[in-house]
Image: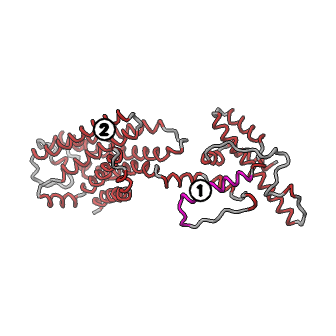
Amino acid sequence: MTESLVLYVPGAVIAAVLIVKAPTLRRGWEQPLMRAVCTLLVGGSLAVILSAPPTIVAVNRLTGVVNFSAPLVYSLLTAFSGACVVVILHWSGTPAAVVRRATRLTVAAYGTVVVAIVTLFALGEAPVERLRDMDTYYAHTPFLREMIICYLTAHTVGSTALTVLCRKWLRRLSPSMLPLRPLRTGLALLMLGGAFDLAFLAAKWTAMAARWSGRDLDHLSTTVAPPLAAAAALFVGAGFLVPLVGGSAPWKDYCRYRRLRPLWAALRGFSPGGLRPVPLTWWSPVGIRLVHRESVIDDGILALGCWFDPAVREEAYGAARAQGRSEEEAALVSDAAMLAAACRHRAEADRAEVHRAEAGQETGQETAPAAGAHPDFPGAYRLDSRPLTELAHAFQTSPIVARARNRATRS
């Protein structure tokens, strides 16, 4: 039972994800990429589920053919490997004409392998039903031996190509490219799944080679390989799904909403005229939450316009350039530093105003925190126009911004 669960659980997870993503995949069915993803998910899920001994028995009994599950599972694994290569080809950014030619070649090659698997099984003799050791039991049987070699070779080529291409592509993507993080995560999961798959294939090949040399290492094929195959299917399926989910509009909105939190937390108390943002309900959609958060940030930046100190910006810009940053990166860091210093100055002024009010002192209009400005700042200085998510990242992580914030506290 435990052995069957090891195979059923990943297969069920992949099938559930396929059902959830079915509307999206159906809408994009005209695209070769979507068709390849469907083939990958269906093939991977069925191959894992049909590899479990109870399912093998059921399929053999249903068809009335002894060991019918063998060519069925081998064909599904071959289709899965081909779909993996096709999806990677579409993701690689290669010119469309090259991708189309490579896709046709891949489909033709793996389709030929599937036909060869079925043909070789029909030509061979497999009178004894094998639930766990089909590969090694028939390792010396004519035609069946070639069938097993055929599927293992195709699967090895596909898994190796998948792992190598993912590693090569992952090294070209910079970690700082925020929009590509779902793709990087997907590639990392694919590499992990490829590693498990190559380990599965190594166990299978080793057990087969031992049989051919007269030794018995069948436990590698029957005990070690199945959990590795289940893990590989799960990680590879997740690796292909993460970029699809991460590229959806709700997910992009959620990622942007989460990345803007540092700015929102710092600026939400500076709404013009002492106004506070309208509260959201817990069921408010993420798109509404994002618009709300961006409005709070824009209002806060507007309220701090008279507290911006150009000297802080110039100093931060020089420090960033001295570190070898580009002009664009230095401008981003300097804007974040000036904003951080303004937040700290304004907060200190507000606290001082509260203390004076508690002490019963009268305050002049020029020191009112909602409309006043620091007497040494020229006022009305604006930030450069740039994506707020990049500004939020620098605002939270840059050491130069942290220094500007600390100096504003001491001044």
Q: Nearer the viewer, residue 247 or 115?
A: 247
| Residue drawn at 37 percent across, 48 percent down | 236
The percent coordinates of residue 230 (x first, y second) are 32, 53
Q: Amino acid at mark 2?
A: Thr
Residue 163 in the magenta stretch? The answer is: no
Q: Position of residue 115 (x, y in %)?
A: 17, 43
Q: Residue at x 11, y 55 (%)?
A: 65
Q: Secondary structure at mark 1?
A: helix
Q: Relative to the observer, which residue lies in front, 202 or 180?
A: 180
* Of labels 2 and 1, the one closer to you: 1
Residue beneath disc 2: 103
Q: Residue at x 78, y 49 (%)?
A: 306
Using the rendered view, name the quadrant where residue 205 is placed.
Answer: top left
Q: Which residue is mark 1?
A: 291
- In the rendering, at what x and y percent does residue 375 appear? 85, 48
Residue 167, numbered label: none
* Viewer-side residue, 131 vs 409: 409
Segment colored magenta: 282-303
Q: Is residue 62 above or below residue 373?
A: below
Q: Amino acid at mark 1?
A: Val
Spatial CA span between label 2 and label 1: 41 Å
Taking 95 as reference, is 1 left or right? left
Note whether 215 is above or below 322 in the view shown: below
Vertical placement of 109 versus 351: above or below?
A: above
Residue 203 falls left or right of residue 281: left
Q: Position of residue 293 (x, y in %)?
A: 62, 57
| Neighbours of disc 2 within 10 Å: few (<14), some (14-19), many (20+) | many
Give the side of residue 51 with respect to residue 87, left or right. Answer: left
